[in-house]
Image (spheres, rainbow, N blue to C red):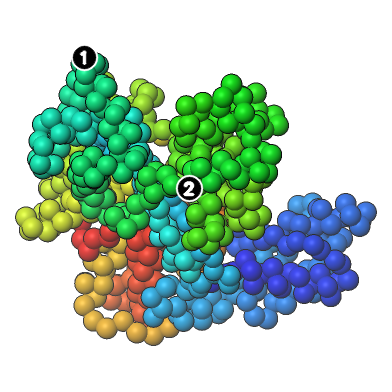
Amino acid sequence: MKIKSELSKIIEQALKSANIQADEIVISDATKPEFGDYQFNGIMRLAKELKRNPREIASEVVEHIDTTGMVSKVEVAGPGFINIWLNNEWLAEVTTEILEDKRVGVGFVEEPKRVVVDYSGPNMAKQMHVGHLRSTIIGDTLATLLEFLGDEVIRQNHIGDWGTQFGMLIAYLEEQNTDGNTQELKDLEQFYKDAKVRFDQSEAFANKAREYVVKIQSGDEHCLELWQSFINASLGHCEEVYEKLGVNLTRDDVRAESFYNDQLPQIIERLKEKNISTTSNGAECVFLEGDENPIIVQKSDGGFLYATTDLAALYFRANVLQAKRICYVVDARQAQHFKQVFTIAKMAGLVGEDVSLEHIGFGTMMDKGGKPFKTRDGGVIKLVDLLDEAVVRAKDAIKDRDVHSDEELDAVAKAIGIGAVKYADLSISRESNYIFNWDKMLSFEGNTSLYMQYAYARIQSILRKHNAEVSGEIIIGDEIEHRLAVMLLKFEDTLIKASIEATPHTITSYLYDLVTLFMKFYELNPILKEDIKEDIKMSRLQLSILTGAVIKKGLEILGIEVVEKI
């Protein structure tokens, strides 16, 4: 339910009736229950324009607000705010209507777009480590959210598979196993280290590796076969992680650097034609106003750089895929790089002015000491090991609750463990660094995945105890039920805000507020007591069912499973 949109229309009509013109109407959530459900704070700006007392203007507007339908009461507060309360009968009617809606009252965007979401971007030379976690989780959540709201989403997994290191790797692969069998690649980390040792110690091997780079780029069949064998093994490791995480990335979503290789000379020519690039010390460079250092797009030896590949990718995504919004879910430390690439792409006409280019930056995952998360010996933690540990710790956290068979315990532990890792990441502002803390993320209290899963499981427990058909309409009988109903109807506005701003924590904050409010409702309003009237019991059961459905849908968008009992 787009409540803010509907309230904006009501305020707009009241302003017109009061002969007041407003360019924009912004409805905000009320900060406290005593201030209503929503607030209109735009009177102050209007008062400056009209040179009038804001409270007088607010009072005029309030006189023209219709309080016979959606809105039950309005009042002027402070220097000129308008507090708005929603009508209980209207709330009851709308929440009852969405009980059978699989989308729990969430509609589709009015103007769906084709959106490219570039995320994960693992290294083909190494197994995925914790440094890849945030891009993968945030990117997949954003893609799922946009799809749910009706956009056409194209997932893109941009991997580096082209360059000097691959000559080294396939040369070593050939030495180890000339038939291209990938058995030697089970431990990518060790394979890479061994290849690097050979490269550093043997000049003959190093020369051979450099020759192989040229052969790869010129299409040598044997070298390409070895190169493909290595890429396949690397992607196999990635797919193991994606399966554990429940992430929706497949081989079809991979767009490697090599995919754009043939287009790079054309990008350089375009930059030259538009007089955007200049030759400096034999290299082709772009000098942007305000930047001290040039952006090199072609080295003096003819080689290309990341910026060139990114420009080719932007051209492909805007013109071939015809995306109108292109999101890069990449470490915040790359902000300057993307700012420069986006500017050049627009200047060169590689991307139309109607295409939105966004760098969805994020901070670093830290340990309790505030340092980048590493193993005890200082190495980078493999992502697959982290996820396996999460499941083990989750099982330990719930094993004494005595509600599961061994088989159920394994499934629930996986849902809780993986959910804990994902939720801990998504629950903080993506631009912030965050402290990785096992005890906090596997707590039954606070803004954790387990708290959400436990609330959902409690609702299912209530329904099992009732053990009968639930029917009838929702009745809003007191303040806590009013607040719960309002919160349930805020779900769509929450998702829309999260999709526009690319902020998954907007969803987690909403879920935490919803669950906290439901727990208070559960405490204050008995559901299954024998002396409760049947229509009240059914109404409270229906509110519980709807709350459970919203929790489940919210977690589903975040890529987290619910469990029936904990």
Q: Which of marks 2 and 1 is nearer the N terminus?
A: 1
The residue at 37%/65% (across/down) is 553
> Residue 263 bears which disc, if any?
2
In the rendered image, residue 113, in percent from the top left (x then y), is placed at 54, 65
Picture layout, residue 85 above or below residue 187: below
**Residue 47: which quarter of the image?**
bottom right
Secondary-structure class at tag 2: helix
Dividing the image into 4 quarters, which one contains the C terminus? bottom left
> Residue 93 bears which disc, if any?
none
Secondary-structure class at tag 1: helix
For disc 1, the marked residue is 201
Residue 495 appearing in the image: no
| Amino acid at dot 1 | Gln
Residue 97 appearing in the image: yes
For residue 18, side relative to residue 490 (left or right) = right
In the rendered image, residue 300, in percent from the top left (x then y), is placed at 51, 26
The residue at 44%/65% (across/down) is 147
